[in-house]
Image: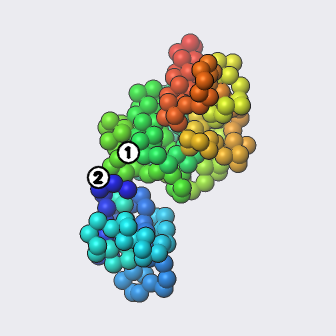
Amino acid sequence: MRQTDSVLEGRNVVLEALRRDTPIDRLFVQEGKPDGPLSTVIREAKRQNVAIEYVKKSRLEQLSETGKHQGVIAYAAAQQYATVEDILQRAKEKDEPPFVILLDGVTDPHNLGAIIRTANVCGAHGVVIKKHGAAGLTATVAKASAGAIVHTPVAKVTNLSQTIDQLREQGLWFVCADAAGDEMYRLDLEGPIGLVIGDEGKGVSDLVKKHCDFTAAIPMFGEISSLNASVAAGVLAYEIVRQRGQK
């Protein structure tokens, strides 16, 4: 990560941040049997359901900006996370059918920031990201979002497929971006909807795709057969906006 992100190093610093309920995106702990103080940090992190990644000492030394990590480094989120319920409540307060953008492992912070920005301007009620194997709300993401991170709820979940199933119980339908899907103009994208976008290169995983109701392909007319993840999210999000506006 870059130095623009909020890097917390050392046991006391990280423990204090956890006890203040500072939103932590990632926590790196030196692998091996932890001593008392480090065990306290781990216990507090687990209590708050913070993802812990156990790494070698050499990895911590690479990440450290001070050289005084004491076996633990945390990256604080630039914005407090919302819940999926918060996103649904936002739609209810606006008296609108829910429109949620769900990201299946988007790892590039610039893509994540751009998607949050798109979600805000297209009227989506929130964004859902994965807890593991994906970018979180770092300072880099905040900058790329052009301030949208403050106004757009972002929820972090452990299992995206389960979240889709839970949202389906609330009446949402799900469409995922897929080059082999049906042309987006032929799909009915009105009503309560979740738009699923995968990471650049990998796309939406087969497991998550199975939990979606249909797949949407963006027409391609040039020599390049794919779009940047954030651009694809923008194109599909505005097709949803267009169809909603035709009511």
Dot 1: what SS?
Answer: helix
Name the foreground residue: 58 vs 109: 58
Residue at x 45% of width, y 42% of height: 112
Name the foreground residue: 139 vs 237: 139
Say if 80 sits above or below 225 in the image: below
Residue at x 32% of width, y 74% of height: 69
Does residue 28 appear to the left or right of 243 in the view shown? left
Name the mark on residue 141.
Answer: 1
Q: Position of residue 131 (x, y in %)?
A: 52, 55
Say if 186 sits above or below 210 in the image: above
Name the foreground residue: 150 vs 2: 2
Q: Position of residue 155 (x, y in %)?
A: 48, 48
Name the mark on residue 29.
Answer: none
Amino acid type for the residue under numbered disc 2: Thr
Regarding residue 31, the answer to whether it shows in the image is yes
Q: Position of residue 197 (x, y in %)?
A: 57, 38
Q: Residues within 10 Å of mark 1 (few under 14, many from 20)?
A: many
Q: How far is mark 2 from mark 1, CA to CA?
A: 10 Å
Number of marks in picture: 2
Does residue 16 appear to the left or right of 181 in the view shown? left
Q: Residues within 10 Å of mark 2 (few under 14, many from 20)?
A: few
Does label 2 or label 1 sit earlier along the sequence?
A: 2
Q: Position of residue 165 (x, y in %)?
A: 66, 45
Does residue 116 appear to the left or right of 243 in the view shown? left
State the residue lying farthest toward the left: 66
Mark 2 lies on residue: 4
Dot 2: what SS?
Answer: loop
Color scheme of the displayed model? rainbow
Quarter of the figure that contains the C terminus: top right
